[in-house]
Image (spheres, helix red, strand yellow):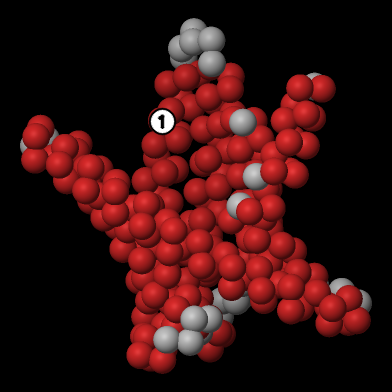
Amino acid sequence: MSQLLAKGADYTFTKLPESREWFRLLSGTVNTLHDLEIEASLIGNLGPIGKLAKGIDGFFYLKKSIEDVEVVVFKGQRLYQVRDKDTLFELFNATVKFTGDTLAAFKWFAVFGGVAVLSPYAKTFGYVKNACSVWAAFVAIKENVEMVHSKCKSADLDREAKMMEGTALAVISVCSLWLNGVGGLSSYVGIETFIERGLDYPKPWTFNSVIILSNVTSIATNIAKS
């Protein structure tokens, strides 16, 4: 227990402040307080912090996009060597992830970066990015559920740790599916479409609460792995 607390303290004071999870957690918390109509003066003070955190969070996509290029190139080279179905699927997944992260970076430049030429396409970038994230979430859920299932039947020394990690990653992927799938769909069709069909429009706090859950789970996973 003391070792876990030491790892948690070390991660909190060294890696967490510069991580994407910290900025998303901050943004999600501030927005949830706003959605639940917590005391107005508090929101007035925290509002700019939430917007800043969201802007910084979006900037992380540029870094992710650059990292994705290396993965796509590596998978492409591997496919050229082995030419099998599994590697082709891996290349496709890597390409989808690269596309989503790159378009998210473009959206950031359009909305926060002041690049006027990209501004008319900001919503389109967001919609395509959401579609890519939904695909990536489905793939991640499948892979992590399979990993937990295989470890459940194994006698490996890291069995419990890997099962916990796989479960946590599956939870994060389900959160991503909600945020990008349901959230993206509701943003695309609009509130009016939900009302016309007699459906309840998802409350804003549900999305921000899922952001908090996703990033708390991610932080806990990172601490356990550190």
Q: Position of residue 26 (x, y in %)?
A: 71, 62
Is residue 193 visible to us here? Answer: no
The quarter of the image holding the C terminus is top right
Instruction: Please give the name of the residue rendered at 80% of the width and 22% of the height, measured from the top-left corner.
Output: 1
Is residue 33 shown above or below 168?
Answer: below
Q: How many marks?
A: 1
Is residue 50 among what the camera can see? Answer: yes
Determine the secondary structure under disc 1.
helix
Residue 64 lies in quadrant: bottom left
Position of 138 with respect to 47 (left or right) is left
Q: Residue at x 84, y 78 (%)?
A: 45
- Between residue 132 and residue 185, name the one nearer to us: 132
The residue beneath circle 1 is 146
For residue 191, side relative to residue 215 (left or right): left
- Residue 101 position, x and y percent, is 39, 62
> Please, is residue 29 above or below residue 75 in the view?
below
Along the horizontal axis of the image, is 99 left or right of 160? left
* Looking at the image, residue 117 lies above or below residue 133: below
Q: Residue furthest front?
A: 14
Note whether 133 is above or below 143 in the view shown: below
Position of residue 196 measured from the top left corner of the image (x, y, whole percent)? 52, 87
Q: Nearer the viewer, residue 91 or 9?
A: 9
Q: What amino acid is labelled 1 in the image?
A: Glu
Residue 63 pos. (x, y %): 44, 58
> In the image, what residue occupies the spot 59% across and 68% down?
56
Q: Residues within 10 Å of mark 1 (few under 14, many from 20)?
A: few
